[in-house]
Image (spheres, coloured by chain):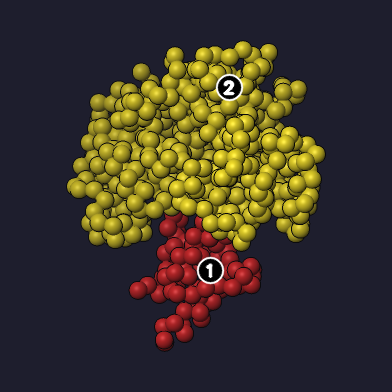
């Protein structure tokens, strides 16, 4: 099974690679068009399904959710209890 | 016969140091792009791609994709471009229907498709970013000769098989020969007066014919091509200003978002555009006015289909009194309005829009009966409804298949939508058919409110009651965060019911069968 980081980075770079010089963690993947507003729902659902997690409405609407690094950290935190169970 | 690759290489010879293409921070001069395209041609031939072969390509917007179009044209191969975000099963079906023999794709595509068994037997598998099992990296093309290979291309070869975004689920590949692509490019160059001084922006996905045309056009005449990899209104405006874009064709959904951004106090200055064309769906009047005001350039709208290319065009500076029209027929095209019996109707009568044009596609690949069924006396039946006025201007009234038949009376969704759009606080809306035991279907309405506006169902009901006939009233109103659209930003009505069920708690469960009727 892929790690959360691997899954998110692979998904976001399905069509386009991040610029080589970019700080991957700080990329706003919505504003930079790596996932559009239609694709976002599918992305979230697939991420939730892959790691057996669920984001709350507050989390989904928080500005940090659109930032790659913050999304990865949040998903990792949520996925951890599942891994131990 | 003139050929796409010949015209490009001749432009390259005349303008070796001029920027041919820019995409995502990478710019290539004409001589660099010519070398890259020639290396790709030789690389494809070396890896077993032969004259007439079909290459499947989940295509992104990149310099490499543009070079591959030229390379394919130069060796007489055809590309089958496909949306890379489609499920693998759909891509597989599309490749099968397009007789794909080779694949060019990114690593993630090959890795994901492995789970679904072999996509195709034999054939070249070329990887665009690195290498993965069983593929050969396109980077190895750098080892090939930068000289064009000798081929027997006549210009009549198939160049693109483009998949229609029809709602039936069955892919219908539209055949576009090199000569058709060339005729279409030249018709648009003439129509919009594009010259070598233009910088032409393509901001829609390259797997659709619109962006392909926008990329090919400038390269044939020594102008510059600007390819936006991913669309957001911010990225579009930034790109236009930084690359000094002078001409573009955008889909109306993109232009609506751009107009919204331009109306904010933080909107960046845009000063280079001389002409913008809106395509795909009718632009709302206030959006169009905002764009004309802020972009300060010629503004056109066009009407057409993938099968026919652009059929009508209108320049709003020249036709101020025809603002709701999609324009007059191009010199290459003729428009007819057909009645239910397939016979032409008088001016002013609403019927199905049919187009006869020299820019017509070659048909649906291996589906001659499907194309035959769509033709009437040499005219392609578009499935769209409209009328021609006394001056020959076409007015679009909605899609035939989107008609809602409630209690036996036809409702054009556009009538309901334009009424609701008048209401302050409505960002966008869509009327659609909703199954009903009593009436067969009723009008349902999906509404997206502007950010921060608490729109009330009651306000919409009052607006409709005041401005629409009884049979046009929406029986169901759902609030959605956004309307379902395809990658071209076109509303996908067939997904409305699904979106309503996803977002609205009060939407009753509807069986798949019923949902499928929409």
Question: What x and y, as percent, mark residue B154?
Answer: 30, 22
Question: What x and y, as percent, mark residue B446?
Answer: 64, 49
Mark 2 lies on a secondary structure that is strand
In the rendering, what colour is chain A?
A: red
- Quarter of the figure with the N terminus of chain B: top left
Residue B351 image label: 2
Say whether residue B431 is left or right of residue B151.
right
Can see residue B455? Answer: yes
Number of the front mark, 1 or 2:
2
Q: Mark 1 points at which residue?
A: A68
Q: Which chain carries label 2?
A: B
Q: Which chain is yellow?
A: B
Question: What x and y, as percent, mark residue B438?
Answer: 59, 42
Can see residue B19? Answer: no
Number of numbered discs overlaid on the protein picture: 2
Q: Mark 1 lies on which chain?
A: A
Q: Check disc 2: other Cα within 10 Å, few if <14, some if 14-19, many if 20+.
A: many
Vertical relation: B405 (above or below) A83: above
Mark 1 lies on a secondary structure that is helix
**Residue drawn at point x = 64 percent, y = 67 percent:** A61
**Residue drawn at point x = 34 percent, y = 51 percent:** B89
Vertical relation: B293 (above or below) B349: below
Q: Residue furthest front?
A: B438
Q: Do the residues labelled 1 and 2 touch (CB within 8 Å)?
A: no
């Amino acid at each position: 099974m892929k790690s959360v980081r691997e899954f998110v980075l692979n998904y976001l770079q399905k069509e386009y690679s991040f610029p080589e010089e970019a700080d991957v963690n700080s990329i706003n993947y919505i504003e930079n068009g790596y996932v559009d507003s239609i694709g976002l729902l599918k992305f979230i659902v697939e991420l939730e399904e892959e790691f057996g997690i669920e984001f709350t409405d507050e989390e989904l609407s928080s500005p940090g959710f659109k930032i790659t690094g913050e999304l990865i950290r949040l998903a990792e935190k949520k996925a951890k209890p599942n891994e131990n169970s | 016969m003139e050929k796409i690759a010949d015209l490009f290489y001749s432009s390259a010879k005349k303008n070796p140091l001029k920027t041919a293409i820019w995409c995502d921070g990478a710019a290539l001069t004409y001589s660099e792009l010519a070398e890259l395209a020639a290396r790709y041609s030789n690389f494809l031939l070396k890896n077993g791609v032969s004259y007439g072969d079909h290459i499947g390509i989940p295509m992104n917007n990149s310099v490499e994709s543009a070079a591959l179009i030229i390379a394919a044209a130069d060796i007489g191969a055809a590309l089958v471009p496909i949306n890379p975000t489609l499920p693998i099963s759909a891509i597989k079906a599309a490749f099968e229907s397009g007789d794909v023999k080779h694949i060019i794709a990114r690593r993630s595509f090959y890795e994901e498709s492995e789970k679904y068994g072999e996509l195709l037997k034999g054939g070249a598998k070329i990887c665009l970013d690195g290498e993965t099992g069983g593929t050969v990296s396109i980077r190895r093309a750098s080892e090939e000769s930068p000289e064009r290979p000798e081929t027997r291309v006549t210009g009549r070869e198939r160049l693109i098989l483009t998949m229609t975004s029809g709602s039936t689920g069955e892919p219908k590949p539209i055949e576009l020969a090199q000569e058709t692509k060339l005729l279409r490019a030249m018709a648009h160059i003439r129509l919009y007066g594009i010259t070598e001084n233009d910088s032409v922006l393509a901001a829609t996905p390259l797997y659709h014919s619109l962006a392909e045309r926008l990329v090919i056009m400038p390269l044939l005449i020594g102008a510059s091509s600007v390819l936006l990899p991913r669309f957001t209104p911010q990225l579009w405006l930034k790109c236009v200003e930084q690359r000094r874009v002078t001409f573009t064709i955008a889909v109306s959904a993109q232009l609506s978002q751009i107009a919204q951004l331009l109306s904010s106090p933080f909107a960046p200055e845009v000063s280079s555009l001389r002409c913008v064309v809106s395509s795909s769906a009718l632009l709302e009047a206030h959006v169009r006015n905002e764009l004309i005001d802020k972009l300060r350039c010629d503004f056109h709208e066009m009407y057409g289909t993938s099968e026919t290319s652009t059929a009508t065009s209108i320049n709003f500076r020249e036709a101020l009194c025809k603002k709701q029209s999609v324009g007059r027929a191009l010199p290459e095209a003729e428009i007819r309005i057909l009645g239910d019996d397939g016979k032409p109707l008088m001016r002013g009568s609403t019927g199905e829009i049919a187009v006869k044009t020299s820019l017509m596609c070659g048909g649906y690949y291996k589906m001659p009966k499907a194309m035959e069924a769509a033709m009437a006396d040499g005219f392609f039946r578009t499935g769209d409804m409209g009328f021609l006025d006394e001056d020959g201007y076409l007015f679009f009234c909605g899609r035939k298949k989107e008609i809602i038949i409630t209690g036996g009376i036809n409702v054009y969704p556009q009538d309901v939508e334009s009424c609701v759009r008048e209401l302050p606080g409505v960002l966008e809306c869509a009327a659609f058919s909703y199954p009903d035991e009593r009436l067969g279907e009723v009008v349902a309405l999906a509404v997206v409110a502007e950010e921060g506006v608490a729109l009330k169902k009651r306000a919409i009901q009052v607006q409709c009651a005041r401005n629409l006939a009884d049979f046009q009233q929406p029986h169901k109103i759902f609030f959605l965060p956004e309307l379902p659209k395809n990658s071209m930003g076109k509303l996908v009505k067939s997904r409305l019911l699904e979106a309503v069920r996803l977002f609205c708690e009060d939407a009753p469960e509807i069986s798949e069968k019923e949902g499928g009727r929409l």
